Amino acid sequence: MNERKRQSEEIQNSGIEKIAGFLSKDGIAVSAGGNVEDLTSRGYGTLKNKKLTLSFYEALFLQSKELLEVYEEGSHQALIFQELLHRFENVDENIWVRYLIYRDLRSRGYVVREGFGLGIDFRVYERGEYGKATAAYLIRGIQEGKPVSVKELAQVLKQVHSLKKKMVLAVINRRGEIVYYTISNLTMKKQ
């Protein structure tokens, strides 16, 4: 508990002020302002036409850190975390898994960005490398008890290696704990 409190205080003392966002079909829309530039420089959201759009898991993370209040258009009542999560689950059935992985990686100091298809959930940048280098790791989230075929993993791994990146499986157990496994090719040689 003390670790979470420390992380929350760390983010709150980082200079980011609480911002307001509005539900949209693509995520949470945040109007332009000083905080938008600060958020984008820290690897949050996608800036388009002077509007920042936060992904669902980014919004949940920032709301859990008390840095974001989310409203429906025309409403003056901010949505609480559970309401927001329920709304997002209607759009993305895996939002809870993505949020847990995102929260864990962010709490470890990594900048985490949206994956770009290919079965990849996230791109993860080495600490201090965001904006300077490309993502070092590509993360695929897997829930314990939900099977994934070896063929599917092999295809994803092949694509990841063609990009010269490291593939990491983030396996979430039933208690919500995450274990990370680096995946590489297995080659067998005849002797």
Image: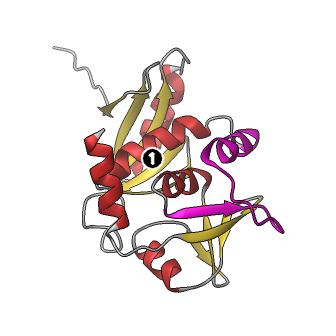
Q: Position of residue 159 (x, y in %)?
A: 46, 44
Total tally of numbered discs in the picture: 1
Q: Quadrant of residue 181?
A: top left
In the rendered image of this protein, does residue 186 appear above or below residue 99? above
Indicate the quadrant containing the N terminus: top left, top right, bottom left or bottom right: top left
Q: Which residue is mark 1?
A: 102
Residue 69 in magenta? yes
Q: Nearer the viewer, residue 17 or 103?
A: 17
What amino acid is labelled 1 in the image? Tyr
Residue at image x 70%, y 44%?
83
Q: Quadrant of residue 76?
A: bottom right
CA neighbours of label 1 inside 10 A, class few (<14), some (14 to 19), many (20+):
many
Q: Is residue 112 left or right of residue 70?
A: left
Q: Residue furthest front?
A: 77
Q: Is residue 169 left or right of residue 132?
A: right
Q: Position of residue 35 (x, y in %)?
A: 49, 79
Q: Position of residue 143 (x, y in %)?
A: 50, 24
Magenta segment: 67-91
Indicate the quadrant containing the C terminus: top left, top right, bottom left or bottom right: top left
In the rendered image of this protein, does residue 158 appear above or below residue 58? above
Residue at image x 61%, y 46%?
81
Residue at image x 26%, y 42%?
2
Residue 73 in magenta? yes
Q: Is residue 183 left or right of residue 116?
A: left
Q: Quadrant of residue 188?
A: top left
Residue at image x 46%, y 72%?
39
In the rendered image of this protein, does residue 78 appear above or below residue 49? above
Q: Residue furthest left?
A: 191
Element under disc 1: helix
Q: Residue furthest right?
A: 74
Q: Position of residue 107 (x, y in %)?
A: 33, 49
